[in-house]
Image: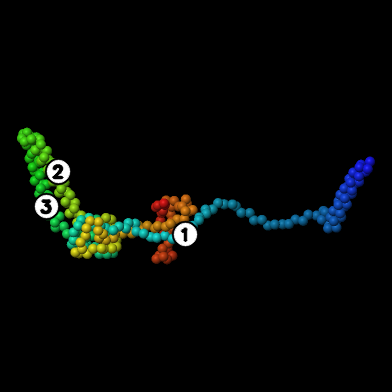
Amino acid sequence: MKNSDTRKRGVLSLIAALAVSGCGTAQAGGIDGTDSEEFVRIINVEVSRVETEKFVEEIRLTAAAVANQDVMVSAEESGVIREVFVDKGAQVESGAPLAKIDDRILTAQVEQARAVAELAGQTWERRKRLWEEDRIGSEITYLEARFGAVQSMAALKGLEERLARTTIRAPFSGVWDERHVEIGSMVTPGQSVGRLIDLDPVRVVAGVPERYVPDVRVGAEATLAFDVFAGERFTAPIRYVG
C-alpha cells in the first residue's frame, strides 16, 4: 500500500506540474496578444535564369623568340677562299652562293677524268660491237672494257661533285647573320664559314608548369606579346608540346 501511494503521488505531481506549465504558457500568450495574430515578413526576391558560360583560365608564361632554323654553314672541301658573295646581314635565297673555294686543281682533275671516261667508253663500245656481232676477242676482254668504262665514269662524277662543292651555297633562305671567312682564308671540311638563320616564321619557346601540361594541346592558339611591339598582340598555333 505504501508503494502504491508513492506511485500515485508521483503521477499526480507530474500532472500538476504540466498543468501549471500549461497555464503559464496560456497566460503569457494572452498578455502579448499574439495568440490570434500572425507576423508576416515581406522579402523582395529577384529571379534570374541560370545560364552556362565559358570559363577561360589564362596562363601567363615568359617565352623566348628563336629562329625557325639556325645553322653554321660549313665548308665541304679544303682550299683557299677566292671569293665571298654575301655580306653580313644580307638576305639570301636557298641555293645562293655564299663563298668560293679555289677550284683550279679540281678543275684540272675533272678534265683529266673526263678524257679518261670518254676513251674508256669508246673502247667498251668497240669491244662490245666486235664481241656481239663478229665474236671477235673474248668475253673477258669485253667485260674488262665494260668495267673500265663504268669505273672511269664513276670517278668523273665523284670529281664533278667535289668541284661543285667548292662553291659554298645557302642550304635554305634566310639572313646571313655571321661571316667567318674573308678572301684568302684557308678552310677545311667541316669548318664554319658563317651563320645562316631563318626568321620566317619565328618560333616562340616557353616552359609550361607540369600541372598545366594536360591543358596545353597542339593546334590550340596562343596569344603573344613582345616588348618591342608594345600594346600589340599576336596569335599563333601551338606546334609542339613535350
Colour pattern:
rainbow
Q: Nearer the viewer, mark 1 or mark 2?
A: 2
Task: Compute the Cα span from label 1 to label 3.
Answer: 64 Å
Mark 2: amino acid? Val
According to the image, label 2 marks what residue?
Answer: 150
| Secondary-structure class at tag 2 | helix
Foreground: 182 or 217?
A: 182
Q: Earlier in the sequence, mark 1 or mark 3?
A: 1
Task: Compute the Cα span from label 2 to label 3.
Answer: 17 Å
Tell me, yes or no, if residue 158 can be seen here.
yes
Label number found at residue 20: none
Q: Is residue 170 left or right of residue 160?
A: right
According to the image, label 1 marks what residue?
Answer: 60
Q: For residue 234, which quarter of the picture?
A: bottom left
Mark 3: amino acid? Glu
Q: Position of residue 13 (x, y in %)?
A: 89, 48
Mark 1: amino acid? Arg
Q: Residues within 10 Å of mark 3 (few under 14, many from 20)?
A: some
